[in-house]
Amino acid sequence: MVSLPASKTTDAARRFWPPGGVLLCVLTACALFLFIDRPPLPIQLWDESRVVVNALEMHAQGFSLVTTYGWRPDLWNTKPPLLVWAMAASLSVFGVSEFALRLPTMLAALGILGLVFGFTRRLSGSTWTASLATILLTLSAGFFGEHAARTADYDVPVSLFITAYAYVLFFLLHRRRPGRSRIALAALLIAAATMTKGIAGLTPGVGVVAYLLIVGRWRRALTRPYLAMGLGAAIPVAAFLLAREQAAPGYLHAMLFNDLAGRFNTSFDKHGGPPWTYLNICFGKGLFSCGWAAAATPLALPIAKGRVRLGLMFSLCMAAGILGVDSLAATKLLQYAVPAYPFLAIACVLAAHAMMQDLKNRDYKAARYSVAACLTIILILYGGRSMALRYIVTPQAMYQAQANYGELFASLAHRGARRVRVIDGGVLGASAMKGYTPQLRAEILIWRPLGLDVARARDLSEAQATPDSYTVTCDPDFIDTLRRLGRDVGAVSDCVALPPHPG
């Protein structure tokens, strides 16, 4: 029987560095790093724009079990609607804006950082170790980059619930008599993860099972409290699925293909790769801040003691479980690794903490100072690399010409425009999605309540300009043509706006 030893935190540390104060300072610094941009990132094509349209249409039509695209039930984005509900609620409170659309994801990112801080501190008893784990996660390009903390995508919100239920389960599994309230909380968090991103909210359970097998507590998961927890998590999800199918038939079939059978058996849009794809994404490409150094964390298991050893083992099981399941799927996308990053950050700092404690116990002062110096140098080097990725490489990689409609519409509204006719043939390089313009549709839905009447034509022959309408495009296929027809007044890169032509 494995017990959970108490962690040690000195009264002096609590007195001079209150954990709450340190957490507030760390979260403030992390929020500045993650979210302060000038100019802010435009709405992204994949897959943020689709989710944004879902939320904007729900905000316009009212709360519903059915998410829509083009005012019809969306059978392409078949994720459960918890994130869309949160985004629609944010729009109702703060008004229609890109900030309101992204606010739920931004809050989820800060929530994950808070959980990582709390989990690590509770295991190690060290506020500074907890702060380091939070910083390592923040500096990870996979956390601040594409499809993550700064865009309205599913991966960070689902990671919040995964990290939260893993946190609760870890301490529950080491209690002789788990309390009903904590069992209920775990069930609620598991259901929320599933209602955010479907089956992806459950796959990290593989890591929990692996941990139970390693520590010899797998029988505990078969006892009544944990079976009740599983049932409590399943009931709301099952109720939603039945109600959603009844409201708009065809949803279950589409969901099973899009989010389970098709994604595991077929490489969607040629997003495949070898079994080691996620090792390369996390460590080789450096989407996790510590790169390949994180792969060495299991070496600290023999010297780790007490809670630190159990926490290190649990974090490694969770990260390996998430990346292992993702590696089995035919479709491999970089954002699927996002839920693993919090556990990699925790594992890295617990391994470093165990190493320093071991040297302290052996009274190897010189070795401790040398190791501390090496760790500091590594952190500085990786931190500098993360800064470059955050402010130079990542924004360029996430740029698309047709994401500039929001900036263009803002420029025209400032000029007093009330009618705009957009010529756009659709997303380039997507022959199966001819005419697909989710970024443009999102901006139309954002600007229409603000008094800008926007209509779209697929080509010049469809464009029916009026004497008071601007003719615009951000589609590279039409930019040169429009420039030959008149003077560009839009002043937005890679876009053209022609002023109204009386008569």
Image (cartoon, helix red, strand yellow):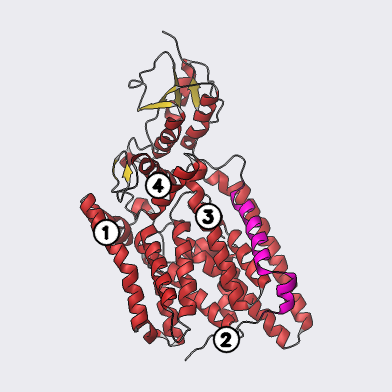
Where does residue 226 sit, x and y in percent of width and height? Answer: 36, 79
Q: Which residue in the structure is indicated by mark 1?
A: 241
Instruction: State how far apart marks 4 and 1 are (Cα).
Output: 19 Å
Nearer to us of marks 4 and 2 is 2
Q: Element under label 2? A: loop
Q: Element under label 3? A: helix
Q: Quadrant of residue 126?
A: bottom right
- Asked if residue 31 is among those painted magenta in the image, a careful observer would answer yes
> Earlier along the polypeptide chain: callout 1 or callout 3?
3
Q: Label 3 near label 1: C-beta < 8 Å?
A: no
Label 3: how many Cα within 10 Å (few below 14, some 14–19, many 20+): some
Q: Which residue in the structure is indicated by mark 2?
A: 5
Which quadrant, please, contains the C terminus?
top left
Q: Amino acid at mark 4?
A: Val
Asked if residue 476 can be seen in this view, the reply is yes
Nearer to us of marks 3 and 4 is 3
Q: Amino acid at mark 1?
A: Leu
Residue 51, which numbered label?
4
The magenta segment is 9-36
Where does residue 39 sit, x and y in percent of width and height? Answer: 60, 39
The kind of secondary structure the magenta stretch mainly shows is helix
Q: Element under label 4? A: helix
Instruction: State how far apart marks 4 and 2 are (Cα).
Output: 44 Å
